[in-house]
Image: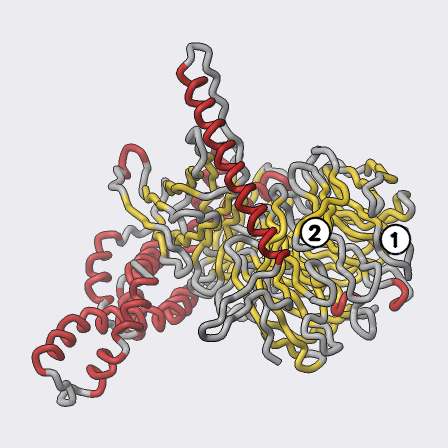
Amino acid sequence: MELSLARVDYLQVGVTAQKTMRLLPASGRRATQKVVVGDQDGVITCFGIKKGEAVPVFKTLPGQKIARLELGGALNTPQEKIFVATGSEVRGFTKRGKQFLSFETNLTESIKAMHISGADLFLCASYIYNHYCDCKDQHYYLSGDKINDVLCLPVHKVNCITPVLACQDRVLRVLQGSDLLYEVEVPGPPTVLALKNGDGGDSGEEIVYGTSDGKLGLTQITGTKPVPKCEVGNDKKRGGILCIDSFDILGDGVKELLVGRDDGTVEIYNFRSADDLVLQYDHALPESISSIQGGCVGKDGYDEILVCTYSGWLTGLTTEPVHREGGSGEELKLSQEMQSKISSLRNELEHLQMKVLQEREKYQQSSQSSTAISSVPAFNVNDKFTLNKDDASYSLILEVQTAIDNVLVQSDVPVDLLDVDKNSAVVSFSSCDSEPNSNFLLATYRCQANTTRLELKVRSIEGQYGTLQAYITPRIQPKTCQVHQYQIKPLSLHQRTHSIDHDRPMNTLMLKGQFSFAEIHSWVVFCLPEVPEKTPAGESITFYFQNTFLGTQLESTYRKGEGCFKSDNISTISILKDVLSKEATKRKINLNISYDINEESVRHTLKLIHPKLEYQQLLAKKVHLIDALRELQVHEGNVDFLLPKYRSILEEADQLLEEYKRQPAHLERLYGMITDLFIDKFKFKGTNVKSKVPLLLEMLDGCDQDGLIAFFDAAA
């Protein structure tokens, strides 16, 4: 069935957090519903739509920023009580705006996630989960990594309380009371959870999850073990998923899955079968979607998808037809309602323009007086710095509540800036003096008008670590700028994984010394991404990692006074040895370092690198031939006399150039990795082979895998 939805903008509130907008239950079948939304100014706004205009029901005074908003009420009754989480407090309001609850929890951190089921309240701070019943403490759990969302299976269907935590370490943790029942591994860091069809499906056990790298999945949470149902990848490289809802927008009696992403994409998925999700419709908005819900808002009888964006816009995608076409020679007549709406909008616009002129003149006069006081305007920045597994690059997303003028990017470590298709900003590079100031990158992105979201991609070099800084300047007066810093870690291209292949040839690094569990954990946090900052519970911990660029592995096990690191890449062990020694020296801790090098691991790593090297060398050769072949084509006209391989280069020229442009310095990066591997292999033997590096680089071009391995062996 073809779906046609029209966009309608209703209202703008303040900047909003994830899952802070809901629709109140309708008073009658297919009647319009009231909208309630909480923003980061601490204001709860409830409104309805009458004759196309937003009519307020109630609005609270500003306060602490609202992190979550949920609806609740007694089980099997309309869920029309409004609950908001602000700081460590939960407040409850009636649908008319009267406050009936102010519950100060015993959490020492701010609430990050909340779920309500009857008298049961489930709250999560960064690492702590608490369950309350009638505001009395029931259960508590300390998670091994940050908690992004919480959900409970419907009690009336499964007959027991089963909370599920979405944790940053790519795991859903299923609890029973205060104990962990089991863990469900998912393909990315889960950011949001939702019940299938809003009620967990027929069994009440089915949960839909969305990840920060844009994947979507369905799993069944049984009492003993999980049953994975389906998984949808992110082939189109869209943003991370922030919100999910179920609603029958097609009107066929089957609920569709509504998905909101952080790149502004709204998607509708169909369940082709019980375990098969198919994309039915998508729509792009200019900023991230913080909340999504299906219902009837604008007009009786017309369903729609209501979304709330980061900057606070409440926007509907409605099934109501809003465009009317006149035939040839026909005059298009507007309804009286539409005419009055246009007239009131024009009056409001004129009034605002006059007010802006008056305030601008007032500001100019006050700035020229001797007692002028200038205040720096505050603005919110929503940023995200994450490692992409697909192309081993970091994605930096910057979103501002107002239009961005320019962003200056500076780095004190060598990084490559990669092209982003969605990015329409004009980039210019400034020359850098890397020696005295450690300044390796200085780039300015000048944004087009009304750009509120900017996405950049950077690729780092492992072993070189420091800070990437973004100076964000919005289009507001007086000019002001915010600086945001992002750490480039020594092993920046490593990503957490659930397990590794123990049959690979591994090199081992052992550390012993007078250090605490917390100290060695802080060193691992400094070296590797995706490690929780909080020291894990227990006496020891094991983390597994995979290099997203090469596919090599790292196993890290440590406890008080002892650490063991195993990798099939000698360069990884070498970087860890250097950085951990440096960190221990800073704290004046003596380390006893020992290592066991496996010669076979070098051949293994070279075999992993060589296919990538061969592909990039071939790509570079093809790109270098394109200009000459095109010139030949212009002169000769017909190129049928060329060999098939050259004709195919001409046919694929645009794709080849695009791929080459998308991966700058890719070949040089691979050469660098092979060189580092060569140096590190002999460094552990106490031999300096830097003088042989030019010879290695010379023979790399066109060298086969066996020849490369022979060179490494012969250098001994």
Q: Quadrant of the C terminus?
A: bottom left
- The picture places residue 171, in percent across and down from the top left corner, at 67, 60
Q: Is residue 3 above or below residue 313?
A: below
- Assign a secondary structure to mark 1: loop
- Residue type, mark 2 in image: Met
Looking at the image, residue 86 sits to the left or right of residue 637; the answer is: right
Please name the residue shown 24% across and 56% down the image. 693
Q: Does residue 79 appear left or right of residue 486 in this picture?
A: right
Density class for disc 1 (Cα within 10 Å; few <14, some 14-19, many ≥20) is some
Q: Which residue is mark 2?
A: 21
Where's the N terminus, which quadrant? bottom right
- Taking the spot 45% from the left edge, 35% from the top edge, the residue there is 476
Of 40 and 283, nearer the camera is 283
| Picture coordinates of residue 612, whole percent (x, y) | 35, 70
Q: Residue at x 30, y 75 (%)?
A: 706
Write the residue at 67% across / 62% down.
244
Tell me where residue 691 appears, x and y as whole percent: 21, 53
Q: Give the spatial CA distance, label 2 vs label 1.
A: 17 Å
x, y percent for residue 105:
82, 38
Count numbered badges in the picture. Answer: 2
Q: Residue furthest bottom?
A: 641
- The residue lying furthest to the left in this view is 635
| Residue ID for mark 1 | 73
Q: Residues within 10 Å of mark 2 (few under 14, many from 20)?
A: many
